[in-house]
Amino acid sequence: MENNCQSHPLSLREIQIQDGFWTKEMELVRREVIPYQWEALNDRVPGAAPSYCMHNFKTAVKKNALRKSQGSAFREPSFSKNGWFFQPKDPQHPDEDFYGFVFQDSDFYKWIEAVGYSLTQHPDPQLEAIADEAIEIVCSAQLENGYLDTLYILGGTDKIFTNLRDHHELYCLGHLIEGAVAYYDATGKDRLLRTACRYADFVCETFGPEEGKCHGYPGHEIAEMALMRLYEVTGEDRYLKLAEFFLDARGTRPYYFDREHPENGTARPDELRHFYHQAHLPVRQQEGAVGHAVRAVYLYSGMASVAKQTGDPALLAACERLWNDIVQKKMYITGGIGSTHLGEAFTFAYDLPNDTAYAETCASIGLMFFARRMLEMTPKACYADEMERALYNTVLSGMALDGKSFFYVNPLEVDPEATKKDERKFHVKSVRQKWFGCACCPPNLARLISSIGSYAYTENDSTLFVHLYVGGQITKQTGPRSFSGIVIRSGFPYDGNVSITFPEDTPSFTLALRLPGWCSSYTVTGTKGAVLQEKEGYLYLTKAFSKNDEINLSFPMEPRLVKCNPLVRENVGKVAVTRGPVVYCLESVDNGSNLPLLSVDSTADARTEEITIAGEAVPSLVIPGFREISSAQGQLYVPYTPPKRESVALRFIPYYTWANRGENEMSVWVREA
């Protein structure tokens, strides 16, 4: 039995999510988020920052019609824009030009990807009709040579692919591919997929190691992993080769971005630079995660995808180094990554400030992308543990419980006054926002939540892997084996009981069940006649299952206090509270103002008490603690006296639910009494 062989995600059409927690989240995305985002993409949300996304595509269609009707008489504008964001002089009457961020096209591609995933779980003819109409607009914006990016189609085609570092054309290609594949998988309709292939083919003709081709690579990565997905769907080797080229070229000398931007080339020839874009060294030589956190984990996901396909040991080793550097030195307990707002970036080992944390929602989603691809190569529970950590904490924190507002930044400590008056904390918001001009996070959330089944389960010829305990029914009619409907019931994230039922006789195969790292023990029943083996944090269970066989797992979810490595200076003398995969926090609405005066009794037991937050019942944890009584009495400094304190009951709530009861203080880490 080869338990370490590669796996791939199940098709979402083979999974019907039926889960007490995730069905609700997915329905929220389907009923609230996807329609809301469609309104936002069309600039129809009062009070929200305009998107201009669909405006740009519609305007590009008009300009293409002029190109076609006027032929050689059409005067192509010369690209003259400068910057990342372009605003019309009069937002009520925008000119026929490109507006928004340079990557604005990608907002539609992420939206259509979420739509595709949602349709696999809940067919919706009305939503599908809206999507089909929008796809027709987007496809009609494509140039005859296959190029598709409205920034240059509207602004002037003379500078196509001349600013790869900043202008995100290849990033938009990546999201186009991801959206097109998702919609094709869901509906069988290939209009957008054919458009994506035409653009990818144009890029293949333009880029490569051959003489006469462009030797550049994306400034913002995602094309690498998207091209691998296109390769898997089409079987066309050129897409694999292009992904490999982008990885092989990245960070080589002389730096491509120096040639592209000679005005910035004042550094010594031997000096390492372009850390922000992860282009400082060839990818196989990179030792640690640097630069823009979202770009980084998107790159590492592409590296893992190529390493899986090609078996490149150096690329795999680099992925493992980079993974370990992130989770052992640069990740918040919530699964947030990218600690500074300056460049939305990684800084240095153990630099994890709480009140200025950036921890972008998209970065944790990207960490999940990376984790799943590492799992597909090597099923180790350490990857799934961190995927789960990010999912139930920072990822879910990015969306309000009603699905109508969002966090871009996910701090671990908030004082609302400071977020308004301290320029160093202006990026931190104490309430979720309706929308963002740079709206990467809301559609990223929608596509991730709608595709949760592909993170929960993967398979190979002998084994079905359960990485996340998400309830549902798996029905397979193709591939190495068929299932008539394996039913998985799960109480996660608040109840550690899981059952797996087989409604019909099933020929012998192996189930690989993750043993969560937060759980020190577990019980399993229903394994009579099975061959059992524990390996790399998974329980491998092999047998031929009979009708109505049932496997039951129990993972105790006891409240735990967690300490931080003392090299994280901000958390010395503090603890965090967790239960199962969920990180908890304090809010002042429950515990009174000035949370730094509170300390938790580390010797006391916690009790679970259900409360309702924004109409949703969640288990809170009540733990004895103390509130320090200040002797300052209005003075700034006073002589030291032993602190006085009063006993209090501290109420902790799941981190992802904070800021759903109005603006107030929040803290994950609390002093240890």
Image (cartoon, rainbow, N blue to C red):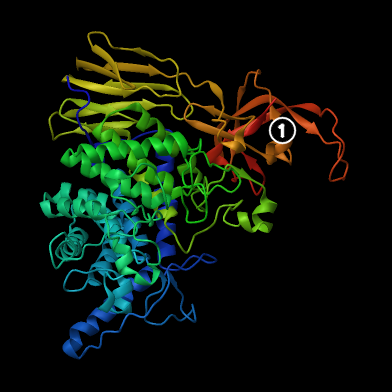
Can residue 349 be seen? yes
Q: Percent x, y for residue 56?
A: 35, 73
Q: 10 Å neighbourhood of mark 1: few (<14), some, or many (≥20)?
A: many
Residue at 48% across / 44% down in the picture? 348
Q: Quadrant of the C terminus?
A: top right
In this view, which residue lies farthest toward the top? 528
In this view, which residue lies farthest toward the bottom? 73
In terms of image quadrants, where is residue 327? top left
Can residue 668 be seen? no
In terms of image quadrants, where is residue 643? top right
In terms of image quadrants, where is residue 637? top right
Residue at 43% across / 42% down in the picture? 25
Q: Is residue 496 left or right of residue 231?
A: right
Q: Amino acid at mark 1?
A: Leu
Q: Percent x, y for residue 158?
A: 26, 79
Q: Quadrant of the N terminus?
A: top left
Residue at 35% across / 32% down in the picture? 383
Q: Is residue 546 left or right of residue 618?
A: left
Q: Percent x, y for residue 435?
A: 49, 59
Under tag 1, what secondary structure?
strand
Q: Nearer the viewer, residue 315 or 405?
A: 315
Numbered marks: total: 1
Q: Is residue 581 left or right of residue 160?
A: right
Q: Nearer the viewer, residue 452 or 197?
A: 197
Q: Is residue 570 left or right of residue 41?
A: right
Q: Percent x, y for residue 536?
A: 31, 22
Q: Nearer the viewer, residue 82 or 516?
A: 82
Q: Which residue is mark 1?
A: 598
